[in-house]
Amino acid sequence: MRWRRNPGGPESWHPHAWQTQSLLLAYPDDAHPARLALARRAADPLPAQVADPLRAFLADAGRIPPDDLAAAYVATFDHRRRCCPYLTYYGHGDTRKRGLALLRLKQTYAAAGWRLADDELPDHLAVVLEFAAAEPGTGHRLLTEHRAGLELLRLALADDGSPWAAVLESVAATLPALKGDDRAAVARLAAEGPPEEEVGLTPYGSSSSSPLFLPDPVFPGGPR
């Protein structure tokens, strides 16, 4: 397949890559084998720096029994904050500012015609990647804005020996290389962690007085 260049913006192959990565970052449920088979076909025409990490993940995932892979997913993304898949957490932690960031992100989706379920948070990486596949210009901007958090997530997964580190390596290959400010942000996040003001996310759209921290993952079922 011959891809078109788009100077100054996402390349024509970026949506193809982002949709594939989104599939592989979904919870390994009963549909996971079908997603793996689709991703194997989808990875073939992608540039090597994007496709090779995806193939590495697919090889690992194919060797792990489905129940073990699902348990590893939960242990990694649900129980380890350093491997949090919710992108606004890295910049705002569990603070009111994160609630506002979630609201702005949901408004961005709505402006593009996307509607999320009430129990879906719009900053889950699988959701952001699926949106980027449908809206490449805006999606590329959103992913780039969260470049430091994505890099910290990639490093945390690599440190844990997680197979999903390869998917994050593939995501990183679709984004601009880290520069001085980005590297400083990654170093600061690694040293200090996200803000710790645990005041809940009630401005996001919940009238409940109970704090909302990291929810159970909710994954996209298709384009909105």
Image (tube, rainbow, N blue to C red):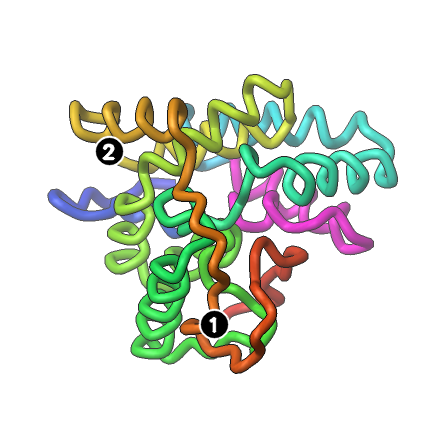
Whole-percent x, y for residue 156 in the image = 52, 25
* Residue 101 seen anywhere in this rendered image of the structure: yes
Compared across the picture, whether 177 is left or right of 16 comes to left
Position of 10 relative to 54 (above/below): below
Residue 214's label in the rendered image is none
User: Which stretch did the figure color magenta?
Assistant: 17-43
* Residue 17 seen anywhere in this rendered image of the structure: no
**Front-most of 40 and 62?**
62
Q: How many discs appear?
A: 2
**Front-most of 140 and 84?**
84
Residue 176's label in the rendered image is 2
Residue located beneath label 1 in the image:
202
Report, in whole angstroms, how far the alpha carbon at label 2 lies from the one at label 1.
Answer: 34 Å
Whole-percent x, y for residue 157 in the image = 56, 26
Q: Residues within 10 Å of mark 2 (few under 14, many from 20)?
A: few
Q: From the image, which quarter does the N terminus lie in? A: top left
Compared across the picture, whether 100 is left or right of 80 comes to left
Indicate whether residue 26 is drawn in magenta.
Answer: yes
| Residue ID at (37%, 49%) | 92
User: Mark 2 is on which residue type?
Assistant: Pro
